[in-house]
Amino acid sequence: MAAKNLVIVESPAKAKTLEKYLGRDFQVKASVGHVVDLPKSRLGVDIKNEFAPDFRVIQGRAKVVEELKRAARDKDHIYLASDPDREGEAIAWHIAEQIKSGKNHQNIHRVLINEITRRAVQEAIAHPQPLDRNKFDAQVARRIVDRLVGYQISPILWKKVRRGLSAGRVQSVAVRLVCEREREIRAFVPQEYWSLEALLEGPVPPPFTARLVEWQGRKVDAKKAPLSQADIDKIVESLRGGEWRIGEVEKKERRRHAAPPFITSRLQQEASRKLGFQPRRTMQIAQQLYEGVELGREGSVGLITYMRTDSTRVSAEAVNAARAYIEERYGAAYVPEKPNAFRSRRDAQDAHEAIRPTSMEYTPERVRRYLRRDVFALYSLIWDRFVASQMVPAVFDQTVFVIPVGDAVFRASGQQLRFDGFMRVYNEGQETNGADDGEEAQEGVLPDLQKGDLLKLLNLEPHQHFTQPPPRFTQATLIKELEENGIGRPSTYASIISNVLDRKYVTLDEKKALVPTELGFLVTDLLVDSFPDILNVEFTAGMETVLDRIEEGKEKRLKALKRFYSSFSKDLKKAEKEMRDVKREETPTDIACDKCGAMMVVKWGRNGQFLACPRYPECKNTKNFTRTPTGEVVEDNGTAVEETCEQCGRPMQLRWGKYGRFLGCSGYPECKNVRPVDKPVDLNIPCPQCRQGSMQQKKSRRGKIFYGCSRYPECDFATWDMPVAEKCPKCGNPIVVEKVSKRGGRTRSCPQASCDYKAQVGDA
């Protein structure tokens, strides 16, 4: 019997999970994401015709659209179940436009599924909604504004700097924040200050340390009232022979409350701090957990609620389930009298619950054997945070000794954990930057002393400190900065970070902090000068508010677009005429061309600045260079390494080229031998083509990982997908290859072109 109803989702993994919860009356199909978008080759927005977008079926998706049309043709009802956010609404709207016909036009419904569980899916199907025009308009407005900015500023950058550059309404502001922070760091001048600690012993052990906090009635403050070495010497001298006694003893109970369950930005930050995940990876794994993972005989199960949210709200049903779990697992003492409630940010859309497990039945211990290590790590993080959010506070006993000695006052503080509360399950990570503010609280327990107890001075120890510059942004702290400034929304943070790294405007230092490149500084300076509104934090945050108003029905899309473009178009015309023409700029140097003798100049090219002969095209000599700390240009002849050229025997040098680092012969140009820096990693899997070599993990010239035979160039077998030592069940080929994608999940296929074997596998 044919299914009477059709449910359309945007990914095969999500479709597989929904099939389990819906009966035979429902057919589930996947659109594999967007089916239409603005054309890549041109602007695609008719500015003169009220900013009409020219949405077209995406290349390669025409077949998908036809399959959806055929599936919808004889159905009584069609349910569009793409993700419950603006982008999901746009996907649903575009699919509806493609498949609607006279028969089913009135039978197309929208269903919002916050968690992919049997109860939630069936509840959503039972109570469908109409498509939301306002939410769709808000997403289209965002798409149009981003297209206008990107496709109209980028050509100016191509003309003035070099081809391939891009600008973005949000990404450019993110780069500006990183650049401004880096300039603060470079301009920072460290200031010396001193602190003084006293090691003391009372009638009761153990000895303890007290810190100088006041001198001659003035509080010691590293920033407002720093002490010099001369001050410390004077204080130490004045304390000689002084009597040390406990002046005041302050004892109090301190409570630390649990953090709320995760919203998107906090999940990305905490996964970065605790697991070392980049935001893009965090969201890819979270998408898998939301859409469903294979749990053995249970099949595909959605383990978490929707992962793009800015709300800390949790359903009463989920709260009650968590409280019951806590009482059973940890005891009644860990359950608060009333459920913990948390306030969302004032500008939160509050459309979805916080990120939480869909069911307390799926404990991390129960699902561990089915999940990859990284998937399990993120699920455990979400689970622990949610459980802890409904537990009682941790309780500390805090003790403070105030010790006056002459004109000085010392202070010692310590604390002891009396009841662990939520910390039994979870403790929030802290962002560290290595700054030494000299104000760390003493941990542990102070001795049991009373007011007036005589103390013995064991040692006075001065410490020299220097004020620290503001720390560089990490991916986690940049997301926090964007969130606090109202820039972007939960669904955009991961792509913002990925874009600025992929565009080479920002790179990562050895500590994984974000550092702007020369290109990042240059493009930011050009855009700030020519487009002050677009690069303004307040303006970008204001645009998010406008989009929210469109979604709420408080503002029309066209009115907002006209207001935006009236000022933006003026900046475009001005930039065309007045933006610096970096491409034609040449900065003289005192480095002579070793081919023609002319003094070389610094120019900008596809890969940044370089030395070039000013007599081009007659002389095409170019060189790399570096700058000294004072900014002087010095010719870069490469860094010597402990390897020799296998062709001529001369030393090899580490150099930079079009595709990054490589080893080149120091005898260049007589010897042009080059080889990659990174050595291949042997996988101990026989090559399926020559059966003699073994498969190795290698990097392409552009830095992308691929897998090839160790006997190259004798054997040229290579694949982008990871080889697995498993015979193809269809043709018997000695290996299959594995690929993981956001939409398709984890799949294995045969690398032989003549074999069409392909199968989706679980995360075991």
Image (tube, helix red, strand yellow):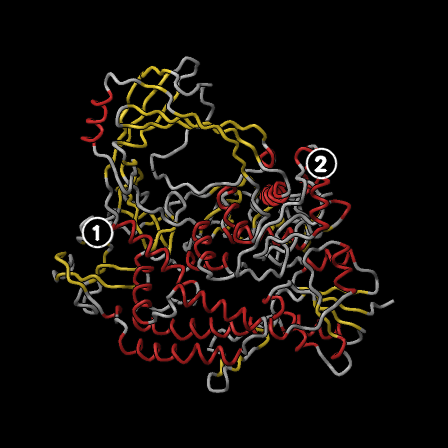
Horizontal relation, residue 444 to residue 324: left or right: left
Q: Residue furthest top?
A: 203
Residue 511 visible to an observer of this rendering = yes
Residue sitting at x 71%, y 78%? 100
x and y percent of residue 634 in the render? 18, 51
Q: Is residue 219 left or right of residue 685?
A: left
* Residue at screen point 74% across, 62% down: 124
Q: Can you identify the residue that label 2 sits on?
A: 327
Q: Residues within 10 Å of mark 2 (few under 14, many from 20)?
A: some
Q: Is residue 437 positioned above or below 159 on the image?
A: above
Q: Is residue 372 visible?
A: no
- Residue 592 location (% of width, % of height): 13, 57
Rendered view: 201 above or below 320:
above
Q: Nearer the viewer, mark 1 or mark 2?
A: 2
For the residue carrying disc 1, how many other residues have a C-alpha within 10 Å: few (<14), some (14-19), or many (20+)?
few
Residue found at the very far right of the displayed protein: 1
Give the quarter of the image for residue 575: bottom left
| Residue type beneath disc 1 | Arg
Quarter of the figure with residue 205: top left
Instruction: Using the image, tell me which numbered label, if any, was put on residue 347.
Output: none
| Quadrant in the picture for the N terminus | bottom right
In the rendered view, does 151 fall on the left or right side of 313? left
Which residue is denoted by mark 1 in the rendering? Answer: 627
**Closer-to-camera residue (199/91):** 199
Q: Which residue is pictured at 52% across the width and 45% down the height?
A: 270
In-front residue for pair 31/334: 334
User: Camera-side residue: 466 or 153?
Assistant: 466
Q: How many marks?
A: 2
Q: Quadrant of the C terminus?
A: top right
